[in-house]
Image: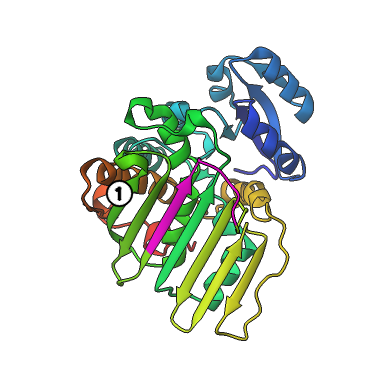
Amino acid sequence: MDNKVLRCGLIGCGKIARIHTPNILATPEVQIVATCCIVEAASKDYAAKFGAEYHTTDVDRVLKDPEIDAVIICTRQDSHLRLAIEAASAGKHIFIEKPLTDTIEEGKRLQEAIHKSGVKLMSGWWFKYSPITKRLREVIPHPYYSTFMCRLPWTEQYIVDDEKGPLLYWGLLGTAGYNLHWLWHVMRSQPTEVYAMGYGGKATNTSSILIRFENGSFGNSVFTDMGLGGINPTKWYVEVQGGPKSAAIHGFTKLAFEGTTEPGIPENRYHDGFDKHWKLLADMCLNGKASTMDAWEASIPTIFTEKALESMRTGKSVAVDFRKEMWLPNGKLPESVAKYGDV
């Protein structure tokens, strides 16, 4: 690709696209040349925001456009697999919002399609880019134990079980997926088993998911949509233990250490990291850089979620082996997974 600017089609013009818009506009290497949405008024509105060449409700028009290098998929998660496979077949590079897919088998299908097409894919689990995460990994490179808590305001419709599956996946995978990916990235070891419990003894969003890793360490994801408040009212709260060293993260705006003279980060802008997507996407597509969140790494929250749901339903721990839960092009884990997200 000889372009100095990545020409993109935006597919899906809803809430997450609106959140991304300022950062895309602030990235000169990325240009939105077409917008597409099933709601024509939204497609037209976003075309005006980006100064796009055209808007449409026909995704095929975007995928068949030879002037488009990549697509940015910001649709509902139940359309991610279909659209990503169609984009790969059309030879378009892909940025796709998280979660990548709902199931392990869907993830395998997408990984195979990406590998065989030769296009590059990048997804949106962004906490790994935060200065908070990077600093923590420098000071405590091999934790013994981590707990990652996420709490959302109480809304009765989200206290759901297997009878309301789509909402279950919205909360547990779409939001607690951050917890699960982050734990793996920070623990720097591959998982061996998952044990999970849900509210009321059911498979629910409100859950505790314990992950054991090969090196003997373990991590715990605690997620609830039953409310904020208490002595720690932040949405995100993390504790990491590494022998004599320990750390606490408040809302990804503060990082504090104990047991070491190493400085933490007293103030950090929450979305510092989230806004890096677009420069990384341009480097990947225009300059041949490796994806910083490829189809294999981006599938990790889906794998953990599916295993956790099985554990909640059976009351038993469930074995997990990424070598079995991913499509492997050469029988080995890709570097993105083998190196715990370091590319």
Q: Position of residue 220 (x, y in %)?
A: 40, 59
Q: Residue at x 42, y 62 (%)?
A: 340
Q: Position of residue 62 (x, y in %)?
A: 58, 22
Residue 333 lies within the magenta run:
no
Visible residue check, residue 291: no
Magenta residues (range): 219-230
The colour style of the image is rainbow
Q: 309 or 39: which is nearer to us?
A: 309
Q: Position of residue 316 (x, y in %)?
A: 21, 50
Position of 6 relative to 57 (above/below): below
Residue ID for mark 1:
329
Q: 234 or 100: which is nearer to us?
A: 234
Type of amino acid at the residue the image marks with label 1: Pro
Q: Quadrant of the N terminus?
A: top right
Q: Is residue 79 left or right of residue 27?
A: left
- Location of residue 272 by image quarter: bottom right
Q: Position of residue 56 (x, y in %)?
A: 64, 16
Position of 125 relative to 203 (above/below): below
As helix, strand or loop, the secondary structure at mark 1 comes to loop
Residue 222 lies within the magenta run:
yes
